[in-house]
Amino acid sequence: MLEGTGTNLFSKIYSSDGKYMAQNHLAQMIGLLGLPPKELVARELEMRKWNFAPAIENDEGTLCHKAYQFYKGPFFDKEGIIRTYLFSSGGVALTCANRQIFVS
């Protein structure tokens, strides 16, 4: 699609100091592709049971035992509902009305 063009499909997925912002990336992917399948959300919820051994350090120097900690999540609640912070600070810009349509 955009390969070899020097154009990125997603924008603002890195902070001004170059740190990857998974919440912005995920919000933009959802904006482009729609909500993830329930099976994918279920796999993410299942993965929360697993621990990294040993713990790994994220870009802020915090030792993380779980993937969602490493990427500063979780991004979905236990029912698979998208966390609202995905829609703020560089994520997908939606009005309150559009936000309700998007998450329903």
Image (cartoon, rainbow, N blue to C red):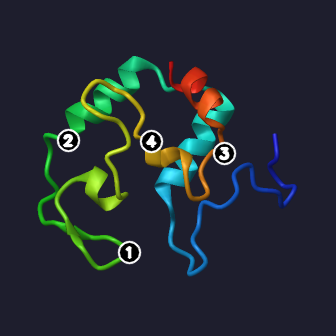
| Nearer mark to the viewer, of 4 and 1 | 4
Residue visible at 31% across and 60% down?
Answer: 70
**On residue 93, which mark appears?**
3
Residue visible at 29% across and 51% down?
Answer: 68
**On residue 59, which mark appears?**
1
Would you name the residue on which mark 2 appears? 48
Horizontal side of residue 50 vs 89, given as left or right: left
Mark 3 → mark 1, Cα distance in angstroms = 25 Å
Q: Residues within 10 Å of mark 4 (few under 14, many from 20)?
A: few
Q: Earlier in the sequence, mark 3 or mark 1?
A: 1
Q: Residues within 10 Å of mark 1 (few under 14, many from 20)?
A: few
**Where residue 26 sits in the image (x, y, percent)?**
52, 44
Element on which disc 2 rests: loop
| Nearer mark to the viewer, of 4 and 2 | 4
Q: Amino acid at mark 2?
A: Arg
State which quadrant residue 47 falls in. top left
Mark 2 → mark 1, Cα distance in angstroms = 20 Å
Q: Amino acid at mark 1?
A: Asp
| Nearer mark to the viewer, of 3 and 1 | 3
Residue positioned most to the front: 96
Q: Earlier in the sequence, mark 4 or mark 2?
A: 2
Mark 4 → mark 2, Cα distance in angstroms = 20 Å
Look at the numbered discs 2 and 1 and tell me whether their residues touch, using CB distance below 8 Å.
no
Q: Earlier in the sequence, mark 2 or mark 3?
A: 2
Q: Earlier in the sequence, mark 4 or mark 3?
A: 4
Q: Nearer the viewer, residue 66 or 81?
A: 81
Mark 4 → mark 1, Cα distance in angstroms = 23 Å
